[in-house]
Image (cartoon, helix red, strand yellow):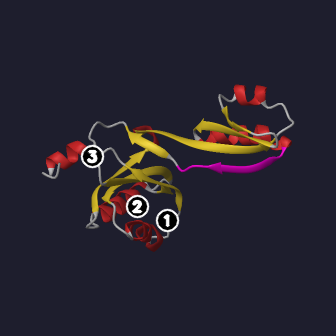
Amino acid sequence: MSTEIKKYTITVFSENYTGILYRITQIFTRRKINIESLTTSESEKEGVHRFTIVVMTAEKTAQNVTLQIEKLVEVLMASCFTDEEVVAHEIALYKMKSGHDFNAIVQSHNAKFLHVEPEFCVIEKTGHKQDTRALFDALKPFGILEFVRSGRVAVSKPMRNLNSYLEEIGEA
């Protein structure tokens, strides 16, 4: 295993218990690993929530953290993936003051106007972090009023999924 620092996406499926997010993040805190991105949502299985966690660390550390997370009682399954093993995107929203013509910039970045008011507009861009950053840089000279980017959402390329895993362990 390499000691090279790389980006890893860790997906965790758990039952929806109070405090589980705290317990998961404590594992990273104890190892002094910064979480670059964290997204939580319901999953394809009713009653099961999904955590998508992005970290920059060595492969062995990412694998060890994933194994430690999987040992938590409430966790059904945890997996660790490299960027090559996931399909991932983020969403970004840009609130801009009205009165400027952003159409060409928005179109050239494959973004869209999500909301338009007389005083402001909100632009939506989905893509990789570098894509949302490129649009940010293009809009910056016009004065961005607000900016927010979601955490990474990702699905794995390998075919083993939550439902097949639950069938394997007899919990489907």
Q: Which mark is residue 61?
A: 2
Question: Compared with residue 161, is residue 14 higher up or lower down, i.e. above or below?
Answer: below
**Dot 2: element:** helix
Three-letter residue code for mark 1: Ile
| Segment tinted magenta in the rendering | 143-151
Three-letter residue code for mark 2: Thr
Residue 154 versus residue 104: which sits nearer the camera? 104
Tell which tag, 1 or 2, sits nearer the viewer: 1
Q: Earlier in the sequence, mark 1 or mark 2?
A: 1
Residue plotted at (47% across, 45% down): 153
Residue 152 versus residue 64: which sits nearer the camera? 152
CA distance for labels 3 and 2: 23 Å
Residue plotted at (65% across, 38% down): 124
Residue plotted at (40% across, 61% down): 61
Query: On the picture, is 82 further left or further right than 141?
Result: left
Query: On the picture, is 103 further left or further right than 29?
Result: right
Q: Is residue 1 in view? A: no
Query: On the picture, is 25 further left or further right than 69?
Result: right
Q: Which mark is residue 82?
A: none
Q: Earlier in the sequence, mark 3 or mark 2?
A: 2
